Image: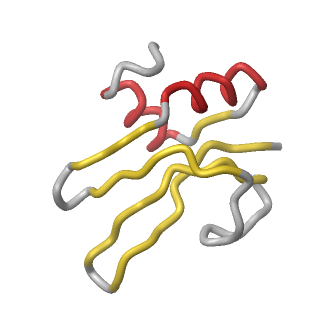
Amino acid sequence: MLKLRLKRTGRKRSPSYRLVIMENTTRRDGRPIEEVGYYNPITKQSHFDTDKIVKWLSYGVKPTKTVSSLLKKADIIRT
């Protein structure tokens, strides 16, 4: 099953995350199928490729709880 989830990057105590499409059995920092955005929780900076995200969601990809809340804040998905 494919998931839309966060992949941690950055260094110790300074995380940043990439929004990626992965199999749900793949480890957190494993190889993604596709990267569709990024999020920095320290500076609250984010960038999402809305066309790719909407395309993958139409294919049936399930976002995690954290990712779905980020996408709701960015008005990409609705409740």
Would residue 46 appear left or right of 77 to someone viewing this image? left
Q: Residue 5, percent across and down?
A: 57, 49
Residue appearing at x 20%, y 49% in the figure: 44
Which quadrant, please, contains the N terminus?
top right
Residue 3 lies, with reference to residue 9, above or below; the image says: above
Where on the picture, by quarter, is residue 60? top right
Residue appearing at x 36%, y 19% in the figure: 75
In the image as oriented, which residue stretches furthest toward the bottom? 12
Would residue 1 appear left or right of 15 to someone viewing this image? right
In the image as oriented, which residue stretches furthest toward the top? 78
Q: Is residue 55 or residue 29 the one in the foreground? A: 55
Residue appearing at x 26%, y 56% in the figure: 41
Q: Residue 69, percent across and down?
A: 40, 33
Q: Residue 76, percent across and down?
A: 44, 21
Where on the picture, by quarter, is residue 3? top right
In the image as oriented, which residue stretches furthest toward the right? 1
Where on the picture, by quarter, is residue 11? bottom left
Would residue 59 appear left or right of 18 to someone viewing this image? right
Q: Residue 33, percent across and down?
A: 74, 53
Q: Which colour scheme is used?
A: secondary structure
Q: How many discs mark residues in the rendered view?
A: 0
Residue appearing at x 36%, y 42% in the figure: 47
Would residue 5 appear left or right of 26 to someone viewing this image? left
Q: Is residue 64 or residue 56 the one in the foreground? A: 56
